[in-house]
Amino acid sequence: MVVLYLIENRIGEGRPSRKESQMELFDLIKALILGFVEGMTEFAPVSSTGHLIIVDDMWLKTEEFLGKYPAITFKIVIQLGSILAVVVVFWKRLFSLVGLYNVENGVKMSERFNLLHVIVGMLPAVILGFAFKDLIDDYLFGVETVIIALVAGALLMIAADRFGPKHPRVQTLDQITYKQAFTVGLVQCLSLWPGFSRSGATISGGVLFGMNHRTAADFTFIMAVPIMAGASLVSVLKNWEYMSMDHIWFYVVGFLSAFIFSLISIRFFLKLISRIKLVPFAIYRIVLAIILAVIVFL
């Protein structure tokens, strides 16, 4: 209400019309909504890509009013908000990986979860991502392929809950072996297929190869920081000459929205995953795929 009052009572030369003010406010609401979608779906195994297709490409259409390259800038900005949320939640573990914090957990230093686990887990997806990026962009970045990926990811998640060990040996991050980290990294390569979901792939891989759901989720989120940060950096470098700050408040609102809702979703998901496991998320993905198929093909 305060924002509306201030907009309505702006005075002086160059005062925008009532219609312009309403459009400015509506644009900020769009940024808030997209930040919400990014924050609530980026780390849950439900595919942020599928949700953004529905909310942005089919409804809000930010590229139409921002322009192509400012829209790219915005997507990078909201992803940075999500990355910051992971850093806030897992700061102790992340800082311990680079020697800035000592996690007191009674485990010998040589046996602790360390930076090499993260590197080994990242490596397969990083190599394949760089090698096949153009092919992925050309052949897998479409609504139809995203719909298929939603269903395929759901089937993997159901398989993980069905065939994963009933009494997993790995109960904490410090019990993860390098072999398990690499194996989960191989499964993570499936998430290069847009719509498959990085967290869905890695958590499923972790569960199938001996981790409990919470540990697999912790590993997924920690590994996401360098991967997402690296992907954002590549996007910035690739599009540097087109980066625009013409819509700075749109970016600020989107960033804060993505950060806040990512914080909420990560904390909630970590409490939830041990109780309900993956099947409910798989069912949700199948329903989302059906909704997308109806919108696109009917």
Image: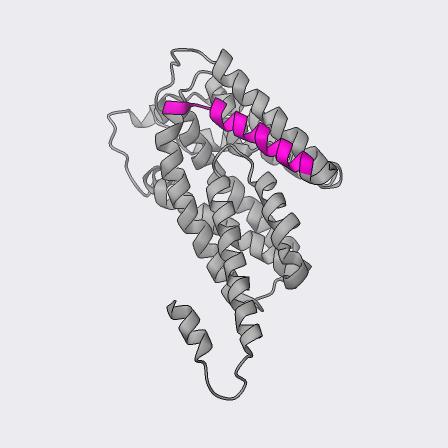
Name which quarter of the figure residue 275 lies in: top left
Residue sitting farthest toward the front: 298
Residue 38, percent across and down?
51, 46
Residue 147, percent across and down?
66, 33
- Locate residue 3 relative to residue 134 in the image: left or right: left
Name which quarter of the figure residue 276 lies in: top left
Residue 212, percent across and down?
40, 20
Please give the name of the residue rendered at 37% of the width and 24% of the height, measured from the top-left corner.
274
Which one is in front, 86 or 142?
Answer: 142
Whether residue 124 is visible: no
- Locate residue 268 relative to residue 206 in the image: left or right: left
Residues shaded magenta: 275-294
Which one is in front, 237 or 279?
Answer: 279
113 versus 142 height, above or below: above
Please give the name of the residue rendered at 68% of the width and 36% of the height, measured from the top-left corner.
294
Which one is in front, 278 or 289?
Answer: 289
257 versus 170 height, above or below: below
Q: Main secondary structure of the magenta part?
A: helix
